[in-house]
Image (cartoon, rainbow, N blue to C red):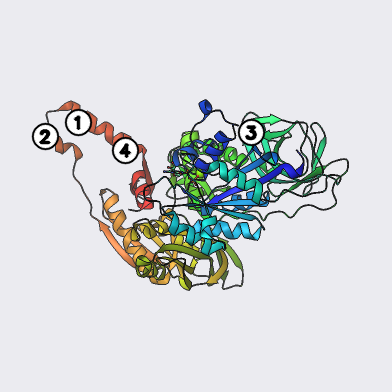
Amino acid sequence: TPPAQIRNFCIIAHIDHGKSTLADRMLQITGVVADRDMRAQYLDRMDIERERGITIKSQAVRMPWQTDAGTFALNMIDTPGHVDFTYEVSRSLAACEGAILLVDAAQGIEAQTLANLYLALENDLQIIPVLNKIDLPAADPEKYAAELANLIGGKPEDVLRVSGKTGMGVESLLDLIVEKIPAPVGDADAPARAMIFDSVYDAYRGVVTYVRMVDGKLEPRERIQMMSSKAAHDLLEIGVSSPEPVPTKGLGVGEVGYLITGVKDVRQSKVGDTITNHRKPASEALAGYTDPKPMVFSGIYPIDGSDYAELREALDKLKLSDASLQYEPETSVALGFGFRCGFLGLLHLEIITERLAREFGLDLITTAPSVTYEVMTDTGETVTVTNPSEYPDGRVAEVSEPVVKVGILLPKDYVGTVMELCQSRRGTLLGMDYLSEDRVELRYNMPLGEIVFDFFDHLKSKTQGYASLDYEPAGSQTADLVKVDILLQGEKVDAFSSIVHREKAYGYGTMMTERLRKLIPRQQFEVPIQAAIGARIIARENIRAIRKDVLAKCYGGDITRKRKLLEKQKEGKKRMKMVGRVEVPQQAFIAALSGD
Ligand code: GDP
Ligand code: MG
C-alpha cells in the first residue's frame, strides 16, 4: 500500500471509557472480523484482560476502509489505559500520526484522559476528540463536548459523538480518520528503518515483533539486523494482523505489521529498538524509548516451600513476554525462600501474582509493596534498599525516597476531603484547576511510598468512586524515615518490617501488633509482640499462655470427632511456620500482610 493510502492511529482514553468496545465495532464495520466470529474485546487476548475488562498489551490491526477518495488501510493500535502501563501507551503513540481521544459521555474527562492526551501531544499526533457511549441515558454530550473543546481547542459541535456499543457514529469516525490524520511520510529508497513498538511471546510461534516501518522496505526471508545489539536474524515471516496474522510479500514506508525471526525471548527483540537490513544497514537508529523502571517491589513466596523451583520457572516464563518484570531470589525468616520482584505499579503486581496463581497453579504469599530507597550510611556509602529488611539500621545518615507528580480529577464537592487525604499522605499541593464548573484537577507532589499502600482505595471510597488518579515519576527527596520491626518473643519477623515516616511509625507499630495478637493462636507460653525502631520498643501486645488440652473439649464419648480434631490439628501444623519457638499459622502472615 502506498503511504498516501495509509492512516496510522490509536485510541487513547481513560480506563473503561470504551476503547476496546469501539475497536470491536471498527473490526466489525470494516469487515475484518465476521459477525459470527465476533466476541467482546476481540483484541484483548489474555484471559485476565478479558475478565477484568482491561487492556494490558497493545495490539495492532489493519482494516480496509473505502471512502470517496479511494481505499485506505487503517492501522489501529489499541492501547492500555492504566497508569502502570503508560510506557505501553507511549510506544504505541510513536507508531501513529493521529489519535482518537475517546471520552465517556456520561463521565467526562478523567485523569488518564489528560495523561494520555499530553503524551499524544508530545508525539505531535493529530487529535480527534470523540464522545463515546452516547446511547447511555446518563450521557450528557453537550456538557462534555464543551469540556473537551475547552481542553484541546475547537468548537463543541466538532466533537464527534459515537456509541461503541450500538455502532452509532462509528462509520463517520472512520471517514474522519481518513480525512484528518496525515498520511505517513518516509524515504522508500533508504535502508530500512522499522521501529519495534511491541514484542509478544507466543508459545507456538516464539517472539512476534510488531513494527512500524519508517523508511525502506523489509521482505520475507531477508536477513535483518537489530540496530542496538547488531544481532542479525533471518526473517521467517512478515505480515500484517487483520487481526489474525496474514503473511505478506513485505512491508514498506508507513506500514504497520509483524515479523517473526525465531528468537525465543522478548529481550532479543526489544521494544524501542530499530530494525534494519543486514546487507545495507541504516546509519542512524530511530529515537528509542527509555526502559520502564520498576517502581514497586514485593516479596513473592510459595506457601508450600517445595514449590520454589516451580515459582522460579513460572517467573522465567512470564519474563519471556514481559521485559518489565524483574526478580531475584531472597530468603525470609518467616516465609522461607522466595523472590523479590519489581513491578511497574500495583496493577502490574496484581496481574503478575494472579497469572502465577492461575496459569501456573501456585499458592503464594506476597509481602507488602515497597518502593526503592537510597540510603546514605554514616560511612558515606550509598545503599539501594528495595526490601525493608535490608535497611542498614543504626548506620543511616540520610534517606531519600521516590516522589511522584500526582494528578487527581474529581467533582468539586470532594476537594476538601481529598486534600485532607493527600495531606495525610505527605502530599504538597502544586496547583488546582477547574476543567469545567464542577470538575477540578488537583496536582500534588507525593512520596510514591504513600501511594503504593492503599491510596487509590481510599481515594475511591472518599469520593464515591468519582475521583481518578494518574502519576508520573518526579525524582526523589530526602525524608525523615525509619524502619519499624515487628518482633515475636524477641525474634524479628522480617516480612513485617516496614520503612515509614517517623510520624507514622507509632501508628504502624500499634496496628501490626494488634493485628497479630488477634491472628496468632495462643501457645503453651506467653508471647510478647513488639514493634521497635532499632532497639527502642514503640508498641507492645501480649498473647497469653494456654495449657488446655484441646481434646478436653470433646467430653469423652465421640471418638470420630476426636479423630477429626486431631487430623485437623495435624493439617494445621503443616501450615505453621516457626518464628523462634513460636508457631505461627501461615494464614496469620497472609492476613496480617493483606491488611483489612
Ligand atoms: P476500555 O477500558 O476503554 O477498553 O473500555 P471497554 O471497551 O472495556 O468498555 C468498558 C465498559 O463500558 C464495558 O462494560 C463496555 O460494555 C461499556 N461500553 C463501552 N462502550 C459503550 C457504549 O458505547 N455504550 C454503552 N452503553 N456501554 C459501553
Ligand atoms: Mg480495553
Mark 2 residue element: loop
Disc 2 and disc 4: Cα gap in Å? Answer: 22 Å
Residue type marked 1 = Lys
Say which label, 3 or 1, has the lower sequence index.
Answer: 3
User: Which residue is at the front of the view, 369 or 405?
Assistant: 405
Q: Ligand 1 near label 2 (Cβ, under 8 Å)?
A: no
Say which label, 2 or 4, has the lower sequence index.
Answer: 2
Say which label, 1 or 4, has the lower sequence index.
Answer: 1
User: Which residue is at the front of the view, 67 or 184?
Assistant: 67
Disc 3 and disc 1: Cα gap in Å? Answer: 65 Å
Q: Using residue 575 as the reference point, say whether residue 215 is left or right of it.
A: right
Residue carrying label 2: 555
**Which disc, if any, is residue 242?**
3
Mark 4 residue element: helix
Disc 3 and disc 4: Cα gap in Å? Answer: 54 Å
Percent of width and height locating residue 74: 65, 41
Q: Using residue 458 as the reference point, say whether residue 278 is left or right of it.
A: right
Residue type marked 3 = Ser
Percent of width and height locating residue 298: 49, 52
Query: How crowded is the residue under tag 2: few (<14 C-alpha within 10 Å), some, or many (20+)?
Result: few
Say which label, 3 or 2, has the lower sequence index.
Answer: 3
In the rendered image, which quarter is residue 200 located in? top right
**Disc 3 versus disc 2: nearer the observer:** 3
Say which label, 2 or 1, has the lower sequence index.
Answer: 2
Q: Ligand 1 near label 1 (Cβ, under 8 Å)?
A: no
Mark 3 residue element: loop
